[in-house]
């Protein structure tokens, strides 16, 4: 079971699809050029290939275990993490004023794809730490930033996000964890959190938990939630870990996948209350939470890309080696590699095209984030921030859905051997399956897309992004490239469906909100197909025009775009119908199906 970082694919997508070159051309990041970026990608690929991929299997088969109250990590994880910190990967995109390297989010997401492709269970740890870093930078008091940011950014300490409780998952209104003022500027927290990724582990000297809780006088609902920093060890005056705090992991969940990642049940206050410090304003935790969640949601989308890439690579290797059946029209007594059978080639193209489309969407989202941070013009920064907000639910949901579908198709390529654990193909599916669920289910992403992001700037953000996709479609049509086949007309059909359903949903938000919600998930998928197809076509146009290949095969770039358009984007017609008509059955579906 091998994995090699697809550096050429990553570099080509950054340059010719996502718009990374603009960051260099406009000098938005000083001292950054393509030679530097390429060197970073190559070194990250080396680390992923040599340090993380080889321990992926041990993470799955050994898993993280709770022994006498202590978490035992799979073989190799602690050593790899120490090397990861020593190499400086933790500080990659953090601001320089807080000890980071100040590199682009988009470059960080490209590197994160490598961590997740090589070892998704390992990659979860820095993903959540970095989300906590962003929350502290945005909302933490200077004293908290000074105390915690340097070691979180370096990776010397890790962080956890503690939101979910047994009775409060997606609906945080019923959150019960309490935080009582201690009279000295600190708070005493009591309660239980579940599904806490890396809530406990032995790989660092300290773990800094970001915990949602209620103050004694907090109003009911999400407006009564506050955010607190609760360290595993309370730091001494010199910053070293001091007294053990009153927070413990009481259980590790037995999960379908990502076995190497400890998913904990955490108890606060068994000895009177865990000491915590308020982050931001009282009852302002929801705003801080979304700072963490938005960062993590794009990171989870990257997980979908990484696991899809790994599943594709394994299926491709297997299809090249496995010999079954005669070639069509060939000698009956001779077998051929299964990649020579049209249906297997079709599945492999599906896997590759979906992974490339997901990568394009995720990287385009991250470049928009970079522009929103660094563009000289305030209007341009705002426009880019809105575009990133629009695309984030697509990047999270569509990329993770594609990751699951690709991992499933990878099992199918393996046939019966895919259902056997020893081949490793099943692990990719088991690992991928969590990604559409955590950090906000993909259904919640669809609700966010339709109710909050579609109306952004009076709908102008959606219309502007659609106009950019149409510009690519016009370029394909005008190119008359025979290698692109019917890509142009497929793009126009899908973009028309996206435009029509977007307008329909916008009307329904004012007239029949339930109808809009019923069509939200098919709209999100339609959006993903239309955007993914147009972005792949953008790359194909660049390839046909002789753009810098970064090591990619131009024919392969064009083939992926054409296959996605001609073989996969046809789904958008059915999705259009589902968006507009789903409410006609959904309105009664819950009541009818819920009858006992």
Image (cartoon, grey):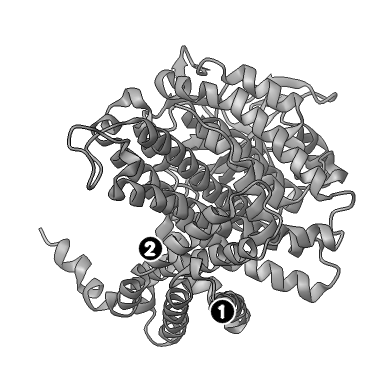
Residue 244 in sight: no
Q: Pointer 2 and pointer 1: residues touching (CB < 8 Å)?
A: no
User: Quick one: SS at disc 1?
Assistant: helix
In the figure, 278 relative to 510: above or below?
above
Nearer the observer, 192 or 19? 19
User: Quick one: SS at disc 2?
Assistant: helix
**N-terminal-most mark, 2 or 1:** 1
Residue 112 in sight: yes
Which residue corresponds to the image point at 64% horizontal and 64% vertical from the top-left? 542
Position of residue 495 measured from the top left corner of the image (x, y, whole percent): 47, 77
Position of residue 4 measured from the top left corner of the image (x, y, whole percent): 56, 33
CA gap, disc 2 and disc 1: 18 Å
Position of residue 356 measured from the top left corner of the image (x, y, whole percent): 52, 53
Q: Name the residue under label 1.
A: 470
Residue lying farthest left? 596
Q: Name the residue under label 2.
A: 568
In the figure, 261 relative to 388: above or below?
above
The answer to whether residue 495 is left or right of residue 582 is right
Crowd class of label 1 (few under 14; some 14 to 19; many from 20; radius 10 Å): some
Nearer the observer, 454 or 363? 363
């Amino acid at each position: 079971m091998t994995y090699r970082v697809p550096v050429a694919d990553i570099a080509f997508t950054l340059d010719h699809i996502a718009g990374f070159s603009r960051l260099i051309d406009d000098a938005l990041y000083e001292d950054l050029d393509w030679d530097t970026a390429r060197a970073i990608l190559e070194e990250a690929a080396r680390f992923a290939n040599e340090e993380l991929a080889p321990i992926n299997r041990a993470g799955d088969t050994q898993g993280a275990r709770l022994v006498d109250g202590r978490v035992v990590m799979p073989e190799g994880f602690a050593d790899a993490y120490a090397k990861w910190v020593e190499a400086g990967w933790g500080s990659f995109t953090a601001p320089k004023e807080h000890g980071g390297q100040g590199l682009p989010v988009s470059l960080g997401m490209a590197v994160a794809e490598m961590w997740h492709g090589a070892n998704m269970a390992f990659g979860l740890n820095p993903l959540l730490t970095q989300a906590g870093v962003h929350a502290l930078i945005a909302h933490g008091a200077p004293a908290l930033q000074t105390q915690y940011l340097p070691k979180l950014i370096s990776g010397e300490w890790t962080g956890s996000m503690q939101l979910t409780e047994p009775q409060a998952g997606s609906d945080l209104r019923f959150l019960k964890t309490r935080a009582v003022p201690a009279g000295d500027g600190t708070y005493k927290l009591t309660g239980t959190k579940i599904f806490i990724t890396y809530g406990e582990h032995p790989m660092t000297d300290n773990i800094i938990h970001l915990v949602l809780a209620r103050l004694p006088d907090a109003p009911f609902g999400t407006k009564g939630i506050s955010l607190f920093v609760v360290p595993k060890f309370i730091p001494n005056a010199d910053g070293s870990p001091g007294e053990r705090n009153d927070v413990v992991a009481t259980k590790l969940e037995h999960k379908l996948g990502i076995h190497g990642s400890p998913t904990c049940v955490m108890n606060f206050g068994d000895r009177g209350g865990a000491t915590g410090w308020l982050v931001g304003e009282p009852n302002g935790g929801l705003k801080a939470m979304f700072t963490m969640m938005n960062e993590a949601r794009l990171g989870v989308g990257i997980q979908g890309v990484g696991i899809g890439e790994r599943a594709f690579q394994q299926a491709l290797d297997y299809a090249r080696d496995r010999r079954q059946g005669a070639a069509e029209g060939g000698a009956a007594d001779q077998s051929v590699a299964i990649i020579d059978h049209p249906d297997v080639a079709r599945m492999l193209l599906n896997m590759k095209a979906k992974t490339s489309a997901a990568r394009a969407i995720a990287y385009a989202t991250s470049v928009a984030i970079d522009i929103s941070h660094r563009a000289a013009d305030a209007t341009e920064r705002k426009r880019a921030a809105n575009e990133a907000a629009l695309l984030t639910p697509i990047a999270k949901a569509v990329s993770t859905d594609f990751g699951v579908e690709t991992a499933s198709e990878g099992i199918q390529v393996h046939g019966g051997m895919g259902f056997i654990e020893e081949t490793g193909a099943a692990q990719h599916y088991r690992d991928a399956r969590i990604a559409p669920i955590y950090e906000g289910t993909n259904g919640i992403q669809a609700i966010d897309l339709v109710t909050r992001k579609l109306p952004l700037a009076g709908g102008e953000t959606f219309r502007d992004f659609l106009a950019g996709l149409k510009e690519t479609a016009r370029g394909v049509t005008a190119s008359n490239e025979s290698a692109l086949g019917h890509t142009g007309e497929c793009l126009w059909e899908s973009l028309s469906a996206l435009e029509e359903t977007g307008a329909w949903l916008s009307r329904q938000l004012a007239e029949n909100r339930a109808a809009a919600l019923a069509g939200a998930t098919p709209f999100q998928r339609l959006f993903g197909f239309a955007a993914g197809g147009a972005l792949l076509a953008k790359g194909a146009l660049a390839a046909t025009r002789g753009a810098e290949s970064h090591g990619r095969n131009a024919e392969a770039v064009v083939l992926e775009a054409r296959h996605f358009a001609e073989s996969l984007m046809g789904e958008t017609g059915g999705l259009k119908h589902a968006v507009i008509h789903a409410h006609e059955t959904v309105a009664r579906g819950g009541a009818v199906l819920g009858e006992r």
